[in-house]
Image (cartoon, coloured by chain):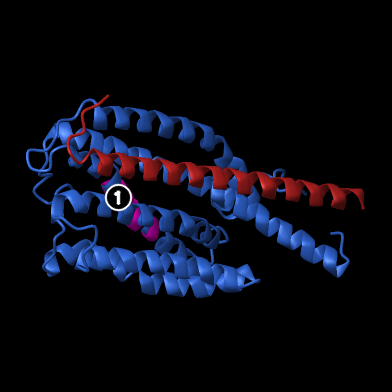
Chain colours: A red, B blue
Amino acid sequence: MIELGPHAAFIIWAYLGVALAVAGLVGWTLLDARRTARKLALLETRRARK
Amino acid sequence: MSIQSTPKQSWWNRIAHPGQFVAWSAPWLWPLAVLTALLFAMGLWLAFIDSPQDYQMGHTVRIMYVHVPNAWLSQFVYGVMALSALGTLVWRHPMADVSMKAAAPLGALFTALALFTGALWGRPTWGTFWEWDGRMTSTLVLLFIYLGIIALWRAFDDQLRAARIVAVFTLVGAINIPIIKFSVDWWSTLHQPASVFRADGPRMPPSILAPLFVMFAAFTLLFLALHLKSMHTEIKRRRIATLQRKAAQGHTA
């Protein structure tokens, strides 16, 4: 375990908060991209059938 | 014609044409993602294993390696949005408002993280999570500007009309960026003055600068990768809106 001194809790919370927020942002970006791509593919398939 | 299968054009049109933009920029995403991950791994190793504690702040200096890159990005992303706003208003560039819209949520999150990590760094070093001084207050105002811009985008169905209004709002809000930058020189503040980007060079030793610059690069590449991906999604979202509008009007073109 890395020694972080008497203010370890502040350091850990700072990195944990950033890690969670960045992971959430990446996840949301990818999910949004996948959902939008699926919707567009569906619309273009329907359009091609007409 | 599908969004992925538009014909080859000149370099300017490749930037301006949404389909072409997706086609030439998509191959950059994976290399960007891999490089970002490698830089984060290296930055974290340097930050926790290979850098000393500060002679005054002790181990809390390690918060700087996430705080400063987020603070830098909060302003850099706004700079990207301001440039895109000029692209929308002056050159009517088709990708400018896509860039502006895709960057806003990213900038808001980086600004929120700068405030969050700053508060956690402030408590052990200054004895307080928050102080209404120039730097912190102007950064909070920046967060509200980002949230206002996101709300403005959502207030309009017609995204082309929204783009011009948001572009004007973005350029007016850009006045806050030099205020943030120079707030530590203009007003009495708890926040330290600039210690990295100075005319006479950084005031930090290389052992602290190295993890800081690696984390700078990691966060900046993270923004570029997410911005690119969000722009692709926004282009597809607009294509969906066009197809739905045509379907509602009874066209099949």
Q: Residue at point 26% right, 48% down?
A: B68
Q: Residue at point 72% right, 62% down?
A: B241
Is B225 inside the magenta-drawn segment?
no
**Which chain letter goes with mark 1?**
B
> x%, y% of residue B1?
77, 49
Q: Is residue B252 left or right of residue B116?
A: right
Image height of B115 relative to B215, above or below: below
Give the crowd class for mark 1: few <14, some 14-19, many >=20 residues within 10 Å. Answer: many
Q: Residue at point 56% right, 51% down?
A: B231
- For the record, the magenta segment spans B68-78
In this view of the protein, which residue sits in the foreground, B209 or B113?
B113
> x%, y% of residue B64?
23, 44
Q: Is residue B2 left or right of residue B38?
A: right
> Residue B179: which quarter of the image?
bottom left
> x%, y% of residue B228?
52, 46
Image height of B249 relative to B69, above or below: below
The tally of labels here is 1
> Which secondary structure lies at badge 1?
helix
Q: Quickly name the residue at label 1.
A: B117
